[in-house]
Image: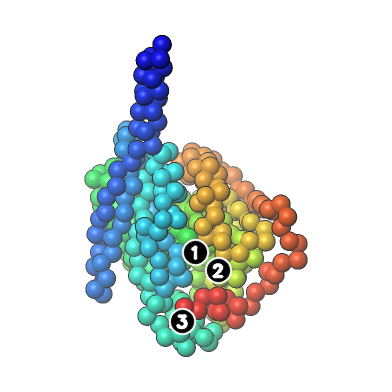
Amino acid sequence: MRKTTLTILFLVAGILCGLSAQTFSTHTFAIVDGDTLRMDVYSPANAEGPTPAVLFAFGGGFTHGYRNDPRYIPYFKFLTDNGITAISTDYRTQLAKVEPSTLASPSGFATALGSAITDAVSDYYRASGYVIANAAQLNIDPTKIIASGSSAGAITALQAEYQLVNKAVPEGLFPAWFNYAGIVTFAGAICAQGQFGWIDMPCPMMLFHGDADSTVPYGSISVGPVSLNGSKTIATTLTAAGVPHTFYTVASKDHSVALSPMEDNLWNILAFIRQTVLGGQKVMVNTVETPIGAPTDYKTDFTLADYIRSNMP
C-alpha cells in the first residue's frame, strides 16, 4: 500500500512539474548606437502549437532597469504556467545620459523625456519585429502578441500602440495586418503632441494605476502642447471610443502599483488575456480597489514640479 501511495505521489509531482516547466533562451535582436539589445524568452515547455506571447518592457524611469529584474520573474513564470510565452526585452534608457540640470526645468524635462520615449519605443518596435520575424522559431502566434510593461516600460508599451494606431510608424516597419493583440500595463502613460486621441481603434487594454502616483500621472499633465496622459485619461478615451478595456485603480497607492499587480492581480490579468484579448469579450470595466485601512485624505493633486522631483536621477 505504501509503495502504491508513493508511486501515485511521484506521478502527481511529475504532472505538476510538467505543467509548470518552462524553457529559457536569450536572443540579441539589435545593436543600436553601440548598445546591444537582447530579449529573454520564457516559453511553456509543453505547449501544443504556437502560443500567445507577452512582450514586456522593464521600469526604471528611462534611466536604468533590467529585463531580468527578479521582481518580474513571478509574472513571467505565471504566464508560462498558463500557456503564454513571456518575452522580456531591452531598450535604451536615454535619460541616464541627460545632465540632471537639464531635467530641472519643465521645458528641459519635457524635451528630454520625449526623446527618451521615442528611443525606447523604437527599440520596442525592433523587439516586436524580431518576434514577428522569428515567430515559428519562438513557437508563438504573431497575431497574439500582447504589449506589457512597468512604469517607463508601461509608457513604452502604451506609446508603441498609440503611435501604431495613430499612423506615426514608418511604412513597412510591420506587416500590414499587425497590431498588438492587447495591452497590460502597470502605472503607464502616453505622451501626446496636441490633442490626445485615437485615429484607428486601439487594441483591448488592461491598465493598473494608483491614484496617488507622483511619478507617472494618474490623470494628465502638460507642458505647452505636450501632454503626458496617465491611465485614468487613457481609460476615459477608451470608454468614449467603445474600446474593450479594464481600468484598475488602486486607491491611495503611489507608484508601487508599477509592481504590485504582478503579485496581487495575476488571476485578473490571466482572465483579461483569456476572455478579452483572446476570447473577444467586448466589455469595459472600471474598478477601484480600496485597501482596508487606506487613508481618505491622501494627496492626489500633484504639480509638474512634483513629477519632475520624483523623476530626477
Q: Disc 1 on helix, strand or loop?
A: loop
Q: Residue at x 71, y 52 (%)?
A: 292
Residue identified by numbered label 1: 151
Mark 2 and mark 1 lie on one chain; the one further toward the N terminus is 1
Q: Position of residue 170 (x, y in %)?
A: 33, 66
Mark 1 is on which residue type? Answer: Ser
Outermost residue toward the front in this view: 2
Task: Indicate left or right for 121 with 25 as reference.
Answer: right
Residue depicted at x 49% and y 64%:
151
The residue to which callout 3 is attached is 111
Identity of the residue furthest to the right in this view: 297
Q: Residue at x 64, y 56 (%)?
A: 250
Sequence-earlier tag: 3 or 2: 3
Three-letter amino acid code at the position of disc 2:
Val
Residue 12's disc number: none
Q: Earlier in the sequence, mark 3 or mark 1?
A: 3
Q: Quadrant of residue 197?
A: bottom right
